[in-house]
Amino acid sequence: MTNLNDMLKNMVKENASDMHLTVGSPIKMRVNGELKSYDEKKLTPQIISNLLKEYINDKKLELLNTGKDIDFSIGISGISRFRVNIFKQRSNLVATFRRLPHNVPDIQTLGLPETVINLTQNKKGLILITGGTGSGKSTTLASMVQKISQDKNSHIITIEDPIEYLYDHSKSIVNQREVGSDTFNFASALRSCLRQDPDVVAIGELRDVESMSAAITIAETGHLVLGTLHTNNASGTITRLVDAFPPEKQDIIRTNLSMSLIAIVSQQLVPNKNNERSLALEVLINTPSIKALIRENNIHQIDNYILSGQKDGMVRMDDCLLALYNDGIISKQKALSFSFNPNEMEKRLNSQTI
């Protein structure tokens, strides 16, 4: 059996985004969105333990044995960095590896519209990058942080679990804090960051009420806050944020969010005809009309307002998918399967005369 470093190097060679080690299964790698076997040899508990023993100390083993999972990152010089999650199932260790680009991609190379790139010019407010696992939201967030660092004389604090991308100090100072080693948790790091004179705060993930509340408060106090959420679209993001709070606090949270929010960018990476993946996205810009919808709890109307807000740089996910199809980049099947409204999308696809 090859060692872990060789397996990770092979991930890069195969252009795999993820690798899974599970007892009773061969090594699996996700290439272009689909899992494929690395070889046919099934993994045993001993093989997985040997592969991971260098990275699991007594403290981490204790966490795993109490039902918790652990996150950390591995770097191979000149090759790539990898985000690692280890957990237990049926008393056996399981490991998932996510490949990260060795360098932060230039924001101009991601296929983002100028509206999204220009969000980095804001001095205060809340920008949310959302999407499912593997949607590229961490990469978008990192590219935005890097652009701010290159363009502005700012103090940027990132709070991550684990640290994924390494930033060079450019015009800005970038201090990166890793949950578990540099700070106890997201909430405590966010509570203390206002004493650290930040201009920009980037949050790896808004996970709970405390971190969500702190992010909104920091944005309200004149700082630029960027964060990610595991939500699929703009309306779902707003609903998730508000519903995380007790009912008696939701009205004030809606009001605060309506004032502090700048934009929500929701992403998907869609397999294309070149055996790669293309970015599809929805963009919500918090115009006065959107502010009113949030404040008055008319979230169900947001999709219609995005459609009518194209002049402000707003984009609907299904319109983006349709454009990718019309440009010959993705198939009809992929446009349908990634659509938010498949029935409407099918009618629109059937009316195309390409």
Image (spheres, grey):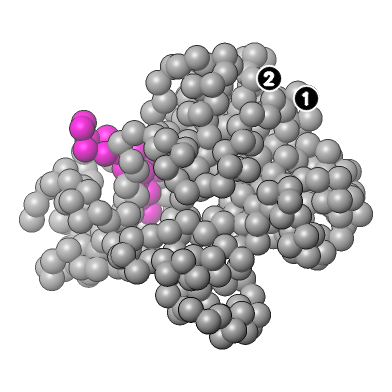
Residue at horizontal 27%, vertical 35%? 75
- Residue 226 x %, y %: 61, 36
Residue at the (53%, 34%) spot, across then down: 144
The image quadrant of residue 252 is: top right
Give the numbered dot on residue 194. Answer: 2
* Closer-to-camera residue (153/176): 153
Residue at which label 1 appears: 221
- What is the three-letter code of the residue carrying label 2? Leu
Task: Assess whether mark 1 and mark 2 are in contact (beta carbons under 8 angstroms).
Answer: yes
Tell me which numbered mark, 2 or 1, is placed earlier along the sequence: 2
x then y, percent, for residue 289: 86, 51
Q: Tag 2's secondary structure?
A: helix
Q: Residue at x 38, y 60 (%)?
A: 277
- Main SS category, magenta section: strand
What number is the disc on residue 240?
Answer: none
Q: Is residue 85 magenta?
A: yes
- Pick the residue in front: 75 or 56: 75
